[in-house]
Every structure is written in C-alpha cells, then in structure tokens.
Image: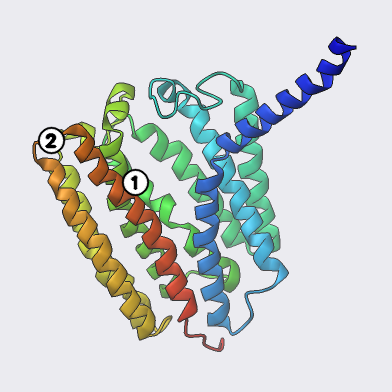
Amino acid sequence: MAVTASIPATSQARRSTLLADYAEMFKLRVSLMVVITAAAGYYLGSLRSGISPLQLQFLQTMLGIGVVSAGSSALNQVLERKTDALMNRTAWRPMAAARIGLVHGALLGLLAVGLGSLYLAIVTTPLTGFLTLLTAASYVAIYTPLKRISMIATFVGAFPGALPPLIGWTAARGQIEWEAVALFTVLFVWQFPHFEAIGWLYRADYARAGIRVTAVAVPGGRATAAQALFYALLMIPVSLWPVYLGMCGWIYGACAIILGAAYLWYTIRFLRITRDLPAEVSRKIARDLLKVSVIYLPLLLAAMILNAQGRIAY
C-alpha cells in the first residue's frame, strides 16, 4: 500500500516541477512587465480614439502579447542554455540544467511565438501581429547571439524591449503615430541605466559566460557609469514628450520631472562604482539603481494613464 500511495505523490511532484520549469522558461515576471507596458499603450491609444479601453479586445491583446513574450523568453533560453550553465544566477534554469530538452524547449517557444502573433493579427490588426513577431524575432535572432560578440548588443536589444507600448497602441489604433513613437522612446531610454546596473551587478557571471556587456567589455566602470548617466539625463526630456504631444497634462509632467530627478539621483550615485570601493558596497549601489529603475517605470506609466488627455477620433 505504501508503494502504491507514493505513485500519485511522485506524479504530482513531477507535474509541479514541470510547471515550475515552464514558469521559469517563460520568465513570467518579465512577461508581466511587457504586458503592463503594452497595456499602457493600448489604454492611451483607446483614449486617442475616444473609446473605452475596457473591452474584450484589450484582454485578447494582452493575452497574445503575453504569450509571444513568454515564447521569446523560452527561445532565448534555448539559445543560451550553454552560457546560462556557466553563470551562477542562471545555472539552475530548466534548459541550462537539462531538465527540459532542446526539442521540447524549442517547440514550446516557437509555438508560443507563432500562435501568439497569429492570434494578435486576427483579433487586432495584421500590423500588430507583425510588429509582435518582429519584436520576438529581433530579440531572439539578433540580440541574443550578439551579446557574445559586442557590447552594442545592449543598444540593439533596447529596440525590441521598447516595442510593447507601441504594439499596444497599434492594437487600439491600427497605425503607428507620433504618440506611439513617444511611448517607444520612453521605454527605449529607460532601459539603459536599468541594464547597466544589471551588467555591473553580475559582471563576473557575464565575463565567465563570455557575454560582452559594457562592464565586461570596458572594465573599470567608467563606460558603464557614463552610459547610465547619459540616458538618465535624457530620460527627463523624453518623458515630457507625451505632454508636448497632448497625450497627458502637466500633472503627469510634474510627476515625470520628480520621478526623473529621483532616477537621475540614483544614477549619479551609481558613478561611485568607478572608485576603489569594497565589492559589496559597489554591488549595493548597483542594486539600488536597479530597484529604483523597476519602481520608476510603473509609476511613470501610472501617472501617464491617470492624467491622460483623451481626444475624439477624427
């Protein structure tokens, strides 16, 4: 009886492990952030058209974008399974630890990207489906392999990383407009201090795996800190572009300035990594900037949505 009773328990454990592995393959927290930024674009695009964003198509759009994002993450781990195995922070991932096989992982990712993009093309517009597929393809086929070749990969990877709000806008409006470009630019610029903090925090891991982030390609921290500072400064005027375009009012503008100043302050503080500091102090400075960047973006988008200026479509 004891042996018989253990069989369902073992089966359940395997299912639980597989579900946990799928969650890690799909990078659910990253996919959630993608969906949040896309939702902001859809909401603002709906207001631009003078319609309510609270409709079935909104849920369908977020579902499709979330599925494609999850599939892109899976394909990224398929391609990086060997380098992931070399880094402490990623060695336990399902592909790196060989808990999920190559064919299994590749099929999972390809099906999610293909079906998700097709679904979006059907329930929204062909442009939205195409842009989503283009985002996934550039992230997986260009950015991922480029990381082992040149530190320009960070710049290249910022393009697919910034597309979700633009995709959300096209789902609501059916076309690319300056407002959508402004949302894209906000996301594009925001990423650099965020990724430079990650690069510095895990530079030893990246060096071990041969991934040429700025902190590895140009040791010492000067290039890493300079790039983060440049984009943190640029973030303030870029975040005010939606005000100029009439998307948001000056309440949002004031919030953008305050949030931008805080982001800039922590980036200026990040310049201390160029000094001869104890390793743990340097890591804390980078971790603080990373935390602030993750807090900054949702707050900025929330202010944008709450102070959005709707206009009737013509």
SS at mark 1? helix
Tell me if residue 145 comes above or below residue 305 in the rendering: above
Q: Residue furthest left?
A: 276
Near-viewer residue (149 or 47): 47
Horizontal placement of 283 versus 94: left or right?
left
**Callout 1 amino acid:** Val
The correct choice, above or below, for 231 with respect to 170 in the image is above
Spot the residue most to the right: 1
Identity of the amino acid at label 2?
Answer: Gly
State the quadrant of the N terminus: top right
Question: Residue 294 location, x and y as percent?
Answer: 39, 54
Badge 1 vs badge 2, beta-carbon distance below 8 Å: no
Is label 1 or label 2 in front?
A: 2
Q: Quadrant of the C terminus?
A: bottom right
- On residue 38, the disc is none
Residue 39 position by quadrant: bottom right
Q: Secondary structure at mark 2?
A: loop
Categorize mark 1 by other alpha carbons within 10 Å: few (<14), some (14-19), many (20+).
Answer: some
Front in this rendered view, residue 157 or 235: 235
Which residue was labeled with disc 1?
156
Left or right: 56 with respect to 52?
right
Q: Name the residue rendered at 48%, 28% in the picture.
A: 79
Q: Where does the image place residue 41, in percent across and percent down from the top left? A: 51, 68
Instruction: Check the image and report above or below for 274 versus 35.
Output: above
Q: Which residue is mark 2?
A: 220
Q: Nearer the viewer, residue 302 or 1?
A: 1
For residue 238, which quarter of the picture?
bottom left
